[in-house]
Image (cartoon, rainbow, N blue to C red):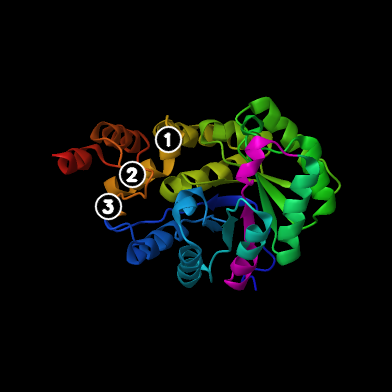
Amino acid sequence: MARHPDFVPQGVIPAVLLPFHDDLSIDEASFRAHLRDVAAVQGLSAITVNAHSTEVASCTQDEQRRVMEIAGEEVGGRLPIVHGIWADGSLEAARIARQAQAGGASALLVFPPAPFTLGQTPEMALSHFKTIADASDLPIIVFQYPLATGQGYPLATLERLFEQVPTIRAIKDWTPLVPQHETQIRALQGRKRPINVLSTNSAFLLSSLVLGCNGLLSGSGSVIADLQARLFRAVQANDLAEARRLNDLIHPTARVFYADPFVDMHNRMKEALVLLGKLPRAVVRPPLVKISDAEVALIRDALIAAGLLDARAALGNAA
């Protein structure tokens, strides 16, 4: 059962990374240290595992179970754990949901099925989420992809999901278009049963929070959770000057982490943690490959600009 049964998805929720050894096996010791480091940040609401940030697409069922087990051991007593549901079929998604709940997760982050890139109907989306909800009563966060991918849900579909699947409590809004993002915030928070909107748009995070997002769920929190938490508090306190100052520190990291190709975002975050002395190596699983030294240099510059890395120390490490 959930270790934090009253958890509501809101606030600052970092999605942590998953370190690997050079032989591509999970580096459990480094993962435990990473979990403790992120969880020590003041003002977090939860952490997320088995998502994009942990390279879930390359992890086996047993590895996902082990990731949840380790997270529960290290931080589960202090923070709720959001467990990603990455599956192309609804039956597999339901199996993962049962496994997550049995392992102590407090909420589910449901990725859209890949077949939806070929087209979807509202009935398909309803069937998918009802199958998951029948398997687990944990709060569900709908991962709202950009509509252009085919995996995003039109607002009318979202409304039907909220009406017929009461355990849906939030969406993680990956919508890249600010007008659509604002429309969804207004529509979801204006409902009789409001649905929380969690931002994941680091490129316009300040704008997103000012528009009224109830929090953020982002892989960059694996590196900059403290900046994100302070920004969220500043916005909640209507301290725009402080919020802008913090956003100016976050901006350089967003530019390098989410550069093209976008798929390398967590690859770059691992390199950032190596530069910060928080990971021993930045190993990713295929098809990802190690990024270039030139790109690592850009990440180093961004960390310096964000005030996370001392310029003199960085020069010494690079020598």
x 51%, y 67%: residue:
65
| Disc 3 secondary structure class | loop
Magenta segment: does it hold 119? yes
| Disc 1 secondary structure class | helix
Label 3 crowd (10 A; few <14 / some 14-19 / many >=20): some
Magenta segment: does it hold 265? no
Specify the amino acid type for callout 2: Ala
Mark 1 vs mark 3: in front? 3
Specify the amino acid type for callout 3: Arg
| Disc 2 secondary structure class | helix
Specify the amino acid type for callout 1: Leu
For residue 124, side relative to residue 31 (left or right): right
On the question of residue 65 being in view, the answer is yes
Residue 249 tag number: 1
For residue 290, side relative to residue 4 (left or right): left
The x, y position of residue 87, in whole percent, is 59, 53
How far, Cα to Cα, is label 1 from label 3?
25 Å
Q: Which residues are magenta?
A: 97-120
x 79%, y 42%: residue:
122
Pointer 3 residue: 281
Q: Is residue 124 above or below residue 92?
A: above
The x, y position of residue 200, in whole percent, is 57, 40
For residue 289, side relative to residue 251 (left or right): left
Quadrant for residue 26, please give it.
bottom left
The x, y position of residue 137, in whole percent, is 73, 65
The x, y position of residue 303, in whole percent, is 34, 38
Mark 1 vs mark 2: in front? 2
Pointer 2 residue: 272
Between discs 3 and 2, the one toward the N terminus: 2
x 53%, y 69%: residue:
76
In which quadrant of the rendered image does the C terminus lie? top left
